[in-house]
Image (cartoon, rainbow, N blue to C red):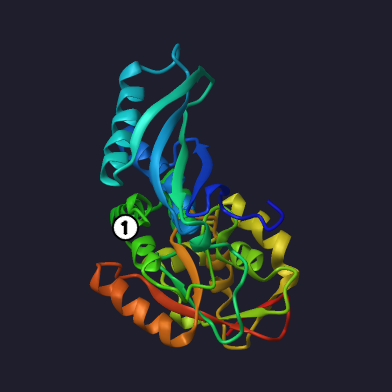
Protein backbone atom coordinates (compact mmCIF):
# COMPACT_ATOMS: atom_id res chain seq x y z
CA UNK A 1 0.00 0.00 0.00
CA UNK A 2 2.95 2.33 0.67
CA UNK A 3 3.86 2.30 -3.02
CA UNK A 4 0.31 2.41 -4.43
CA UNK A 5 0.70 -1.02 -6.00
CA UNK A 6 -2.07 -2.33 -8.22
CA UNK A 7 -3.30 -5.10 -5.91
CA UNK A 8 -2.74 -6.70 -2.52
CA UNK A 9 -0.63 -9.86 -2.12
CA UNK A 10 -0.86 -12.31 0.78
CA UNK A 11 1.57 -15.23 1.18
CA UNK A 12 -0.15 -18.55 1.91
CA UNK A 13 2.99 -20.67 1.85
CA UNK A 14 6.56 -20.45 0.54
CA UNK A 15 5.51 -21.23 -3.03
CA UNK A 16 2.05 -19.64 -3.20
CA UNK A 17 0.48 -16.22 -2.61
CA UNK A 18 -2.93 -14.82 -3.44
CA UNK A 19 -3.54 -11.51 -5.18
CA UNK A 20 -6.68 -9.54 -4.36
CA UNK A 21 -8.16 -6.47 -6.01
CA UNK A 22 -11.51 -4.76 -6.52
CA UNK A 23 -12.69 -2.33 -9.19
CA UNK A 24 -16.05 -1.08 -10.47
CA UNK A 25 -17.37 2.01 -12.22
CA UNK A 26 -20.28 3.62 -14.06
CA UNK A 27 -20.96 2.89 -17.76
CA UNK A 28 -18.56 4.42 -20.28
CA UNK A 29 -20.34 3.02 -23.36
CA UNK A 30 -24.03 2.85 -24.27
CA UNK A 31 -24.22 -0.88 -24.93
CA UNK A 32 -24.71 -2.76 -21.62
CA UNK A 33 -23.14 -6.01 -22.86
CA UNK A 34 -19.99 -4.16 -23.96
CA UNK A 35 -19.90 -2.26 -20.66
CA UNK A 36 -19.89 -5.58 -18.80
CA UNK A 37 -16.96 -6.85 -20.84
CA UNK A 38 -14.92 -3.67 -20.34
CA UNK A 39 -15.58 -3.59 -16.58
CA UNK A 40 -14.35 -7.16 -16.18
CA UNK A 41 -11.26 -6.59 -18.32
CA UNK A 42 -10.41 -3.54 -16.23
CA UNK A 43 -10.80 -5.37 -12.92
CA UNK A 44 -8.68 -8.35 -13.99
CA UNK A 45 -5.88 -6.10 -15.20
CA UNK A 46 -4.52 -5.38 -11.72
CA UNK A 47 -3.83 -9.09 -11.16
CA UNK A 48 -2.00 -9.33 -14.48
CA UNK A 49 0.04 -6.25 -13.61
CA UNK A 50 1.25 -7.94 -10.41
CA UNK A 51 2.51 -10.95 -12.37
CA UNK A 52 -0.38 -13.16 -11.32
CA UNK A 53 -3.12 -15.30 -12.81
CA UNK A 54 -6.73 -14.43 -11.89
CA UNK A 55 -8.78 -17.43 -10.76
CA UNK A 56 -12.08 -16.35 -9.21
CA UNK A 57 -14.26 -13.26 -9.14
CA UNK A 58 -17.35 -11.87 -7.44
CA UNK A 59 -19.72 -9.43 -9.12
CA UNK A 60 -20.27 -5.98 -7.64
CA UNK A 61 -23.53 -4.49 -8.93
CA UNK A 62 -25.38 -1.24 -8.33
CA UNK A 63 -28.59 -0.81 -10.32
CA UNK A 64 -31.62 1.55 -10.36
CA UNK A 65 -34.19 -1.23 -10.45
CA UNK A 66 -37.12 1.21 -10.50
CA UNK A 67 -35.73 3.35 -13.34
CA UNK A 68 -34.17 0.89 -15.78
CA UNK A 69 -35.44 -2.31 -17.29
CA UNK A 70 -33.95 -5.44 -15.72
CA UNK A 71 -32.93 -6.60 -19.21
CA UNK A 72 -30.15 -3.98 -19.13
CA UNK A 73 -28.71 -5.54 -15.99
CA UNK A 74 -28.92 -8.99 -17.56
CA UNK A 75 -26.87 -7.80 -20.53
CA UNK A 76 -24.25 -6.19 -18.31
CA UNK A 77 -23.86 -9.42 -16.36
CA UNK A 78 -23.85 -11.51 -19.53
CA UNK A 79 -21.04 -9.41 -20.97
CA UNK A 80 -19.09 -9.72 -17.76
CA UNK A 81 -19.54 -13.48 -17.59
CA UNK A 82 -18.48 -13.96 -21.21
CA UNK A 83 -15.31 -11.96 -20.52
CA UNK A 84 -14.56 -13.99 -17.41
CA UNK A 85 -14.92 -17.18 -19.43
CA UNK A 86 -12.46 -15.83 -22.00
CA UNK A 87 -10.00 -15.19 -19.16
CA UNK A 88 -10.61 -18.63 -17.58
CA UNK A 89 -11.89 -16.93 -14.44
CA UNK A 90 -14.69 -18.54 -12.40
CA UNK A 91 -17.55 -16.40 -11.09
CA UNK A 92 -18.20 -17.54 -7.50
CA UNK A 93 -20.73 -15.00 -6.25
CA UNK A 94 -21.29 -11.32 -5.75
CA UNK A 95 -23.44 -8.64 -4.20
CA UNK A 96 -25.95 -6.12 -5.53
CA UNK A 97 -27.56 -2.97 -4.17
CA UNK A 98 -30.14 -0.55 -5.53
CA UNK A 99 -28.57 2.75 -6.62
CA UNK A 100 -29.51 5.81 -8.66
CA UNK A 101 -27.17 4.83 -11.51
CA UNK A 102 -25.72 1.51 -12.70
CA UNK A 103 -22.26 0.46 -11.61
CA UNK A 104 -20.50 -2.80 -12.26
CA UNK A 105 -17.17 -4.44 -11.56
CA UNK A 106 -15.47 -7.29 -9.76
CA UNK A 107 -13.65 -8.38 -6.67
CA UNK A 108 -10.91 -10.64 -8.04
CA UNK A 109 -8.65 -13.27 -6.50
CA UNK A 110 -5.57 -14.55 -8.31
CA UNK A 111 -2.42 -16.49 -7.52
CA UNK A 112 1.31 -15.91 -7.93
CA UNK A 113 4.55 -17.41 -6.64
CA UNK A 114 5.82 -15.08 -3.90
CA UNK A 115 9.17 -14.78 -5.67
CA UNK A 116 7.46 -13.79 -8.95
CA UNK A 117 5.39 -10.85 -7.70
CA UNK A 118 5.80 -7.76 -9.89
CA UNK A 119 5.61 -4.38 -8.17
CA UNK A 120 5.36 -0.91 -9.68
CA UNK A 121 8.74 -0.03 -8.12
CA UNK A 122 12.16 -1.43 -8.96
CA UNK A 123 12.93 0.06 -12.39
CA UNK A 124 16.68 0.41 -13.02
CA UNK A 125 18.49 3.06 -15.10
CA UNK A 126 19.04 1.65 -18.57
CA UNK A 127 15.73 -0.24 -18.56
CA UNK A 128 13.42 0.22 -21.51
CA UNK A 129 9.69 0.79 -21.02
CA UNK A 130 7.08 -1.15 -23.00
CA UNK A 131 3.48 0.03 -23.29
CA UNK A 132 1.14 -2.71 -24.53
CA UNK A 133 -1.94 -0.71 -25.61
CA UNK A 134 -2.56 2.53 -27.47
CA UNK A 135 -3.63 5.62 -25.51
CA UNK A 136 -6.69 7.80 -25.88
CA UNK A 137 -9.66 5.90 -24.42
CA UNK A 138 -10.60 8.73 -22.05
CA UNK A 139 -10.59 11.30 -24.85
CA UNK A 140 -12.50 8.92 -27.12
CA UNK A 141 -15.17 8.31 -24.47
CA UNK A 142 -15.56 12.07 -23.95
CA UNK A 143 -15.97 12.55 -27.69
CA UNK A 144 -18.60 9.80 -27.82
CA UNK A 145 -20.59 11.44 -25.01
CA UNK A 146 -20.38 14.75 -26.88
CA UNK A 147 -21.49 13.17 -30.15
CA UNK A 148 -18.30 14.18 -31.98
CA UNK A 149 -16.47 10.84 -32.22
CA UNK A 150 -16.46 9.08 -35.57
CA UNK A 151 -17.42 5.41 -35.67
CA UNK A 152 -13.88 4.24 -36.42
CA UNK A 153 -12.45 5.86 -33.28
CA UNK A 154 -15.30 4.56 -31.15
CA UNK A 155 -14.83 1.02 -32.47
CA UNK A 156 -11.05 1.14 -32.03
CA UNK A 157 -11.16 2.41 -28.46
CA UNK A 158 -13.82 -0.11 -27.40
CA UNK A 159 -11.78 -2.97 -28.90
CA UNK A 160 -8.75 -1.86 -26.89
CA UNK A 161 -10.72 -1.58 -23.64
CA UNK A 162 -12.12 -5.08 -24.12
CA UNK A 163 -8.73 -6.64 -24.89
CA UNK A 164 -7.47 -8.63 -21.91
CA UNK A 165 -3.92 -8.05 -20.67
CA UNK A 166 -3.67 -11.82 -20.36
CA UNK A 167 -1.32 -12.43 -23.31
CA UNK A 168 1.13 -9.79 -22.14
CA UNK A 169 1.06 -11.17 -18.59
CA UNK A 170 1.67 -14.73 -19.78
CA UNK A 171 4.68 -13.61 -21.80
CA UNK A 172 6.06 -11.69 -18.82
CA UNK A 173 5.61 -14.74 -16.59
CA UNK A 174 8.13 -16.65 -18.71
CA UNK A 175 10.88 -14.11 -18.02
CA UNK A 176 13.18 -13.39 -15.09
CA UNK A 177 14.22 -9.87 -16.10
CA UNK A 178 11.07 -7.81 -15.43
CA UNK A 179 12.03 -5.12 -12.91
CA UNK A 180 8.67 -3.35 -12.55
CA UNK A 181 5.17 -3.34 -13.99
CA UNK A 182 1.89 -1.47 -13.63
CA UNK A 183 -1.24 -0.99 -15.69
CA UNK A 184 -2.29 2.37 -17.13
CA UNK A 185 -5.71 3.45 -15.87
CA UNK A 186 -7.25 6.54 -14.29
CA UNK A 187 -4.09 8.54 -13.53
CA UNK A 188 -2.96 8.42 -17.16
CA UNK A 189 0.40 7.16 -18.36
CA UNK A 190 2.35 9.97 -16.69
CA UNK A 191 0.59 9.50 -13.35
CA UNK A 192 1.26 5.78 -13.23
CA UNK A 193 4.81 6.25 -14.55
CA UNK A 194 5.48 8.72 -11.72
CA UNK A 195 4.39 6.08 -9.20
CA UNK A 196 7.16 3.89 -10.64
CA UNK A 197 9.92 6.36 -9.78
CA UNK A 198 8.55 8.41 -6.88
CA UNK A 199 10.94 8.43 -3.95
CA UNK A 200 13.62 6.62 -5.97
CA UNK A 201 16.94 7.71 -7.45
CA UNK A 202 15.66 7.34 -10.99
CA UNK A 203 13.76 9.28 -13.63
CA UNK A 204 12.03 8.45 -16.90
CA UNK A 205 12.47 9.62 -20.46
CA UNK A 206 9.48 9.21 -22.81
CA UNK A 207 9.97 9.17 -26.59
CA UNK A 208 7.07 11.36 -27.78
CA UNK A 209 7.15 10.04 -31.34
CA UNK A 210 6.96 6.41 -30.19
CA UNK A 211 3.78 6.62 -28.10
CA UNK A 212 0.91 4.62 -29.68
CA UNK A 213 -2.49 6.34 -29.78
CA UNK A 214 -5.83 6.05 -31.52
CA UNK A 215 -6.17 7.78 -34.87
CA UNK A 216 -8.28 10.92 -34.50
CA UNK A 217 -7.32 11.62 -30.88
CA UNK A 218 -4.86 14.39 -31.78
CA UNK A 219 -7.56 16.40 -33.55
CA UNK A 220 -9.89 16.03 -30.57
CA UNK A 221 -7.24 17.26 -28.13
CA UNK A 222 -6.41 20.24 -30.31
CA UNK A 223 -10.08 21.23 -30.44
CA UNK A 224 -10.46 20.97 -26.66
CA UNK A 225 -12.33 17.66 -26.43
CA UNK A 226 -10.74 16.31 -23.26
CA UNK A 227 -12.13 14.68 -20.09
CA UNK A 228 -12.13 16.43 -16.72
CA UNK A 229 -9.96 13.64 -15.32
CA UNK A 230 -7.19 14.62 -17.75
CA UNK A 231 -7.18 18.17 -16.38
CA UNK A 232 -7.02 16.90 -12.79
CA UNK A 233 -4.18 14.51 -13.64
CA UNK A 234 -2.22 17.30 -15.30
CA UNK A 235 -2.66 19.72 -12.38
CA UNK A 236 -1.51 17.08 -9.91
CA UNK A 237 1.66 16.01 -11.74
CA UNK A 238 2.67 18.80 -14.11
CA UNK A 239 5.44 20.09 -11.81
CA UNK A 240 7.21 16.74 -12.18
CA UNK A 241 7.08 16.73 -15.98
CA UNK A 242 9.62 18.34 -18.32
CA UNK A 243 8.62 18.90 -21.94
CA UNK A 244 11.39 18.78 -24.53
CA UNK A 245 11.64 21.42 -27.24
CA UNK A 246 10.59 18.97 -29.96
CA UNK A 247 7.62 17.49 -28.07
CA UNK A 248 4.22 18.60 -29.45
CA UNK A 249 1.98 20.20 -26.81
CA UNK A 250 -0.92 17.82 -27.50
CA UNK A 251 1.22 14.81 -26.56
CA UNK A 252 1.29 16.02 -22.96
CA UNK A 253 -2.50 15.89 -22.81
CA UNK A 254 -2.48 12.43 -24.39
CA UNK A 255 -0.08 11.17 -21.73
CA UNK A 256 -2.31 12.55 -18.95
CA UNK A 257 -5.49 11.06 -20.44
CA UNK A 258 -7.22 8.78 -17.89
CA UNK A 259 -7.48 5.32 -19.39
CA UNK A 260 -10.13 2.69 -18.80
CA UNK A 261 -8.76 -0.84 -19.04
CA UNK A 262 -5.43 0.40 -20.41
CA UNK A 263 -2.32 -1.56 -21.22
CA UNK A 264 0.57 -2.77 -19.12
CA UNK A 265 3.66 -0.59 -18.61
CA UNK A 266 6.73 -2.78 -18.20
CA UNK A 267 10.32 -1.99 -17.21
CA UNK A 268 13.15 -4.38 -18.14
CA UNK A 269 16.68 -4.28 -19.62
CA UNK A 270 17.07 -3.14 -23.23
CA UNK A 271 17.91 -6.54 -24.72
CA UNK A 272 15.05 -8.20 -22.89
CA UNK A 273 12.65 -5.45 -23.92
CA UNK A 274 13.42 -6.02 -27.58
CA UNK A 275 12.90 -9.77 -27.17
CA UNK A 276 9.65 -9.32 -25.26
CA UNK A 277 8.36 -6.80 -27.80
CA UNK A 278 9.01 -9.27 -30.64
CA UNK A 279 7.14 -11.97 -28.72
CA UNK A 280 4.22 -9.63 -28.07
CA UNK A 281 3.93 -8.66 -31.72
CA UNK A 282 3.92 -12.36 -32.69
CA UNK A 283 1.15 -12.93 -30.14
CA UNK A 284 -0.99 -10.25 -31.80
CA UNK A 285 -0.29 -7.31 -29.49
CA UNK A 286 0.36 -5.00 -32.40
CA UNK A 287 0.22 -1.74 -30.41
CA UNK A 288 2.93 -2.86 -27.98
CA UNK A 289 5.83 -0.42 -28.26
CA UNK A 290 9.01 0.62 -26.46
CA UNK A 291 8.13 4.21 -25.55
CA UNK A 292 10.89 5.25 -23.19
CA UNK A 293 13.67 4.40 -20.79
CA UNK A 294 14.61 4.67 -17.15
CA UNK A 295 17.37 7.22 -16.47
CA UNK A 296 19.52 8.21 -13.50
CA UNK A 297 18.75 11.93 -13.87
CA UNK A 298 16.76 14.03 -13.39
CA UNK A 299 15.63 11.99 -10.40
CA UNK A 300 11.91 11.84 -9.66
CA UNK A 301 10.94 13.50 -12.94
CA UNK A 302 9.71 12.49 -16.39
CA UNK A 303 11.21 14.13 -19.46
CA UNK A 304 9.24 13.91 -22.73
CA UNK A 305 11.32 14.38 -25.85
Q: How crowded is mark 1: few (under 14 residues within 10 Å), some or many (20 or more)?
A: some
**Nearest the camera: 36 or 140?**
36
Q: Where is residue 141 in the image (x, y as percent from the top left)?
A: 44, 49
Q: Where is residue 189 in the image (x, y as percent from the top left)?
A: 55, 65
Q: Name the residue under label 1.
A: 156
Quadrant that contains the C terminus? bottom right
Name the residue rendered at 48%, 70% in the picture.
266
Q: Where is residue 145 in the image (x, y as percent from the top left)?
A: 45, 44
**Nearest the camera: 3 or 299?**
3
Quarter residue 199 falls in? bottom right
Task: Report whether 250 appears left or right of 70.
Answer: right
Name the residue rendered at 48%, 72% in the picture.
178
Residue 173 at least partly seen: yes
Say if 93 sits above or below 283 in the image: above
Quarter residue 296 falls in? bottom right
Residue extending furthest front? 14
Residue 260 at least partly seen: no
Q: Position of residue 185 (x, y in %)?
A: 52, 54
Amino acid sequence: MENADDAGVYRLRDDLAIIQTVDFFTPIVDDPYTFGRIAVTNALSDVYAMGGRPLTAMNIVCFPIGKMDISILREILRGGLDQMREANVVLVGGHSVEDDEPKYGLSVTGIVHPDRVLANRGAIPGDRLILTKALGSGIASTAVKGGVADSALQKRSVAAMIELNRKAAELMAKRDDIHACTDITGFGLLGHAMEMIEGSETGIKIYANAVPYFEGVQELIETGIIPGGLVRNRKFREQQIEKGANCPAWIIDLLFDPQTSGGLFISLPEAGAKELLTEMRKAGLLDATIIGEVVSAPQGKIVIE
